[in-house]
Image (spheres, grey):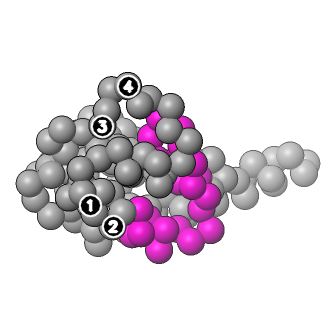
């Protein structure tokens, strides 16, 4: 992404900052996330495309050689065996741009995070009602 353009205000604007082939990957990723979390809202957080539902669900970002996907540490831990072929850290995973992204796996991770966030929100509501 152009280093000078650091304050994007929408996911559309973010995606347009990349070459066409990367835009296509980012748009497909966005659509996979939308389908897996239809009630989530889109926003830019930490200068990255973010989906939120009762808190942040997932973030993603494009880099020179990979797409960074950030489903929180719990999303990585729950799928660690399936993600083992990819570089990553506690709360992130790197999908190389020279390989097809595992969209079906990403969809399942997003669905996991939706369930997790809804359960946390429900538990919080129960605590505040007491």
Of discs 4 and 2, which sits in the foreground? 4
Q: Return the residue at label 3.
A: 1
Inspect this view and state whether residue 10 appears: yes
Q: Crowdedness of circle 2 by 10 Å Cα count: few (<14), some, many (20+)?
A: some
Q: Crowdedness of circle 1 by 10 Å Cα count: few (<14), some, many (20+)?
A: some
Residue 51 among those drawn in magenta: yes
Residue 81: % across, % down: 20, 56
Q: Crowdedness of circle 4 by 10 Å Cα count: few (<14), some, many (20+)?
A: few
Magenta residues, start to end:
30-52
From this viewpoint, which residue is outermost toward the top?
4
The answer for how far apart the CA atoms under marks 1 and 3 are is: 14 Å
- Contact between marks 1 and 3 (CB within 8 A): the answer is no
Residue 102: % across, % down: 22, 65
Of discs 1 and 3, which sits in the foreground? 3
Viewed as shown, does residue 119 lie left or right of 45?
right
Q: Return the residue at label 1.
A: 25
Q: Name the secondary structure under disc 4.
A: loop
């Amino acid at each position: 992404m152009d280093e000078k353009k650091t304050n994007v205000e929408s996911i559309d604007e973010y995606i347009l900052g990349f070459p066409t082939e990367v835009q296509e990957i980012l748009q497909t990723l966005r659509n996979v996330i939308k389908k897996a979390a239809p009630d989530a809202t889109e926003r830019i957080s930490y200068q990255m495309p973010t989906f939120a539902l009762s808190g942040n669900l997932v973030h993603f970002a494009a880099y020179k050689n990979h797409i960074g996907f950030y489903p929180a540490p719990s999303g990585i831990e729950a799928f660690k065996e399936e993600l083992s072929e990819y570089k990553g850290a506690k709360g992130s995973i790197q999908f190389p741009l020279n390989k097809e992204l595992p969209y079906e796996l990403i969809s399942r991770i997003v669905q996991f995070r939706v369930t997790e966030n809804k359960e946390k929100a429900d538990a919080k509501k129960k605590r505040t009602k007491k």
